């Protein structure tokens, strides 16, 4: 089955640094979503994007829907220890189905 | 409590046994999903349901059975558990509008010995 290509696979950074991660696909999507998974919990929705070129922020998080509709980006500014977790992108191709395709995840570790 | 709940949180079972993982949501969401999460594979869809009595296979359905007689419940059954089914299982639900994201449960960690 298809999964989205998400990079990097993991990141180990110092508190206060900015973080960037991205997700790419060979197919066009009409919705991009970003989730965060804390250890031992299920993923939680962070940001949803619905239009090509859209830039949306949620606190220190900013995500963009790529112009080609085949990619999306997530930036975290001034990272803090509670940003630790796995970040997943997810895309929806459209039509009547409500199925999401998930990326393989980016593991973020933040050293205080 | 409102939300989506999974039970049990942890389960150890023996190879060959049947085991059922439960999922219950209180929002009357139309869609429900079962995923498994394994290192290096991210989240893989096992089965999903668009409404009560409507289910369909996902990416990795072999060895699993689902049913959805009521909108709020979506149990996942492993008919004869194998070690390769050791994983963390997540249930999710979503409203019917395709622009909405999913809400996930807290997961069930299943170990097959």
Image (spheres, coloured by chain):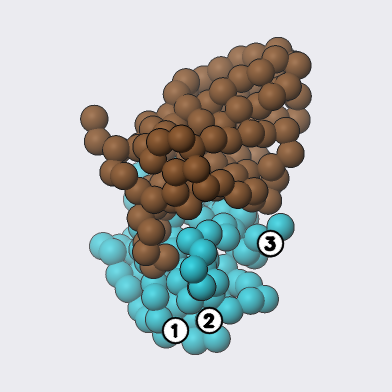
Chain colours: A cyan, B brown
In the rendered structure, the residue with mark 3 lies on which chain?
A: A
Name the side, left or right, on which A22 lies relative to B93. right
Density class for disc 3 (Cα within 10 Å; few <14, some 14-19, many ≥20) is few
* Residue A84, x across and y down, in percent: 43, 46
Q: Is residue B84 above or below residue A34?
A: above
The vertical placement of B92 against B75, above or below, is below
Q: Is residue A70 above or below residue A98?
A: below
Q: Secondary structure at mark 3?
A: loop
Spatial separation of the CA atoms under disc 1 and disc 3: 21 Å
Q: Which structural element holds mark 1? A: loop
- The number of discs equals 3
User: Gap in Å between the C-alphas at discs 3 and 2?
Assistant: 16 Å
Residue drawn at x 62%, y 64% is A4
User: Under tag 2, what secondary structure?
Assistant: loop
Residue A48, image x, y percentages: 37, 66
Pointers 2 and 1 in contact (C-beta within 8 Å): yes
The tag earlier along the polypeptide, 3 or 2, is 3
Determine whether, in the image, residue A38 is placed left or right of residue A12.
left
Residue at label 1?
Answer: A52
Residue at which label 2 appears:
A69
Q: Which residue is mark 3?
A: A2
Viewer-proximal residue, B11 or A18?
B11
Depth check: B60 or A89 in front?
B60
Q: Report x, y in % for residue B52.
A: 44, 43
Q: Chain of mark 1?
A: A
Crowd around label 2: few <14 · some 14–19 · many ≥20 (10 Å): many
Output the chain of dot 2. A
Q: Quadrant of residue B36?
A: top right
Q: Is residue A108 above or below residue A92?
A: above
On the question of residue B84 being in view, the answer is: yes
Judged left or right of residue A31, residue A105 is right
């Amino acid at each position: 089955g298809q999964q989205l290509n998400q990079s990097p696979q993991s990141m180990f950074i110092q508190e206060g640094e900015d973080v960037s991660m991205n997700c790419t696909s060979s197919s066009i999507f009409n919705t991009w979503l970003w989730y965060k998974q804390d250890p031992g919990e299920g993923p939680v929705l962070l940001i949803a994007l619905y239009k090509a070129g859209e830039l949306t922020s949620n606190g220190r998080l900013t995500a963009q829907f790529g112009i080609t509709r085949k990619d999306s980006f997530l930036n975290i500014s001034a990272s803090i220890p509670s940003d630790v977790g796995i970040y997943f992108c997810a895309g929806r191709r459209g039509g009547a189905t409500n199925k999401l395709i998930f990326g393989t995840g980016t593991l973020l570790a933040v050293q205080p | 409590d409102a939300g989506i709940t999974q039970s049990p949180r942890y389960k150890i079972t023996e190879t060959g046994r049947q085991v059922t993982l439960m999922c219950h949501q209180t929002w009357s969401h139309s869609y429900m999903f079962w995923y498994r999460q394994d290192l290096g594979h991210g989240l893989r869809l096992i089965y999903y349901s668009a409404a009560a009595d409507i289910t369909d296979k996902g990416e990795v359905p072999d060895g699993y059975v689902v049913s959805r007689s009521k909108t709020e419940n979506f149990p996942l059954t492993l008919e004869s558990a194998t070690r390769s089914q050791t994983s963390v299982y997540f249930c999710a639900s979503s409203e019917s509008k395709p622009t909405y994201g999913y809400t996930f449960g807290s997961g069930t960690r299943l170990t097959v010995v």
